[in-house]
Image (tube, coloured by chain):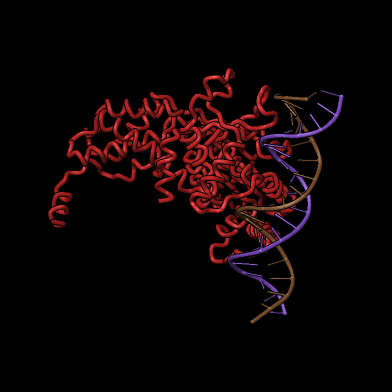
Chain colours: A red, B purple, C brown
DNA sequence: CCTCCACAGGAAGCGCAGGAGT
DNA sequence: ACTCCTGCGCTTCCTGTGGAGG
């Protein structure tokens, strides 16, 4: 029985030559349609090779527009070039989703710089000092890449500390590259932080359908066997991803899943239909992985929001203002959240902390909020779900069993 | 105009955990 | 083994804001 399954799987002819190369994590050698950006970042970072501090750079653009992969590409080249020329340059990449406070970022920096030592439990001041010491001792230029920088809670303090360190250092220096996919994030920054972080700025335009198709073509050559991917599949995946705000990650995932579906069906080629089928799968996967990383209380609040918006009936019919159509008041969300938590036998947080959760959910892009403005309940926020309510409910249910 | 409602968000502080110093 | 320290999630308390309604 089991052997026959193994047997069948073994005999199945794979469509892939190297499946890894069509996964969203794979960084190809060539980054099409980003030559201009690569050149700009390179000439900026070249200053570090001359042992000068480079201007801080702030990059924003929607998800899947190639920000992270471009920056990583350039910094990798920079470091290997520096090694060849004996220049004192080091680059550190930090994802602020997991390192979301100035302390955690500092900690991570030190752990990268001193891989054999443990800094857990030391005070912030100590960790900061040891970072300075590293620069002073080695006289290196550090390029610190802060990905998803908008998720750092005390970002003003962090940027201030990193910038100020340059004044305290006798040797070496520190430059920051901040990456964010939140367009409004910059406007909310403290003016001082803004001016120090955004010395140079870059916007990554989303890819259009034609560019996405080229990217997919390039990737499919690497990952699939020859002539296994039909033109129609590429077109379809590119079109879907272009609609989803030009996200190359989605495009690549679509083709990957479509390939798997085609294999399951024992097809020789990946076509239009497989991509169509992959679409639903990918959408759910993206939502699921986003929700997966959320703490329990945030999941519960999100569940309440999703539940309310799926239940919402009739109310929007007499809301004259299109701004408020389909939107929820934070008060009603809090009540539902408390109720649902009680039903599950879980404790709920205070109304104050609930506000913070709403803010976090907004930062992660699950919801959009706006000030109520004229005509509605004074000073309150209108909250709207950014994704399909039912998919979110399903994903959370899966999470909470 | 005044008061109340419903909310946003700042400030202070509390308990816990994990580590350092002794 | 103990005390002290720090970060962190969270609560409590408080002030501010703008519409609704008398």
Asked which quadrant contains residue A359, the reply is top right
Residue A104 in sight: yes
Q: Position of residue A326 (x, y in %)?
A: 53, 26
Residue A287 falls left or right of residue A143: left
Q: Depth check: give the residue in front, B10 or A340.
A: A340
Q: Depth check: give the residue in front, A365 or A200.
A: A365
Residue A309 falls left or right of residue A55: left
Which residue ends up furthest to the top in the rendered image? Answer: A320
Q: Quadrant of the N terminus of chain A?
A: bottom left
Q: Depth check: give the residue in front, A164 or A137.
A: A164
> How many marks on residues?
0
**Residue at x 25%, y 43% (from the top left corner):** A17
Q: Position of residue A263 (x, y in %)?
A: 21, 40
Q: Is residue A291 above or below residue A324?
A: below
Q: Position of residue A95 (x, y in %)?
A: 53, 48
Q: Depth check: give the residue in front, A231 or A385.
A: A385
Q: Position of residue B1 (x, y in %)?
A: 87, 24
Residue A178 in sight: no
Asked which quadrant contains residue A19, the reply is top left
């Amino acid at each position: 029985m089991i052997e026959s399954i193994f047997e069948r799987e073994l005999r199945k002819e794979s469509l892939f030559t190297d499946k890894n190369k069509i996964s969203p994590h794979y960084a190809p050698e060539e980054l099409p349609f980003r030559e201009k950006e690569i050149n700009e970042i390179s000439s900026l970072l070249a200053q570090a090779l001359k042992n000068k501090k480079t201007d801080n750079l702030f990059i924003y653009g929607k998800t899947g527009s190639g920000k992270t992969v471009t920056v990583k590409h350039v910094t990798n080249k920079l470091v290997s070039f520096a090694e060849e020329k004996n220049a004192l340059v080091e680059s550190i990449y930090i994802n602020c989703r997991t390192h979301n406070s100035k302390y955690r970022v500092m900690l991570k920096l030190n752990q990268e710089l001193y891989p054999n030592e443990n800094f857990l439990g030391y005070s912030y001041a100590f960790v900061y000092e040891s970072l300075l010491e590293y620069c002073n001792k080695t006289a290196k230029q550090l390029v610190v890449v802060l990905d998803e920088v908008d998720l750092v809670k005390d970002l003003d303090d962090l940027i201030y500390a990193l910038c100020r360190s340059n004044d305290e250092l006798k040797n070496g220096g520190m430059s920051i590259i901040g990456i964010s996919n939140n367009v409004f994030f910059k406007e909310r920054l403290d003016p001082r932080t803004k001016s120090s972080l955004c010395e140079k700025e870059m916007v990554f335009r989303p890819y259009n359908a034609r560019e996405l198709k080229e990217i997919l073509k390039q990737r499919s050559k690497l990952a699939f066997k020859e002539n296994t991917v039909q033109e129609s599949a590429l077109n379809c995946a590119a079109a879907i991803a272009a609609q989803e705000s030009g996200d190359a990650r989605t495009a690549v995932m679509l083709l990957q899943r479509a390939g798997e579906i085609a294999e399951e069906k024992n097809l020789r080629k990946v076509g239009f239909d497989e991509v169509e089928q992959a679409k639903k799968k990918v959408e759910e996967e993206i939502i699921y992985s986003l929700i997966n990383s959320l703490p329990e209380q945030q999941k519960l609040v999100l569940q309440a929001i999703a539940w309310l918006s799926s239940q919402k009936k009739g109310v929007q019919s007499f809301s004259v203002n299109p701004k408020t159509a389909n939107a929820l008041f934070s008060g009603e969300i809090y009540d539902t959240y408390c109720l649902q938590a009680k039903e599950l036998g879980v404790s709920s947080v205070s109304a104050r902390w609930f506000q913070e959760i709403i803010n976090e959910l907004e930062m992660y892009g699950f919801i959009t909020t706006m000030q109520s403005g004229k005509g509605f309940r004074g000073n309150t926020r209108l909250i709207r779900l950014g994704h399909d309510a039912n998919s979110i409910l399903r994903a959370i249910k899966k999470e909470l069993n």
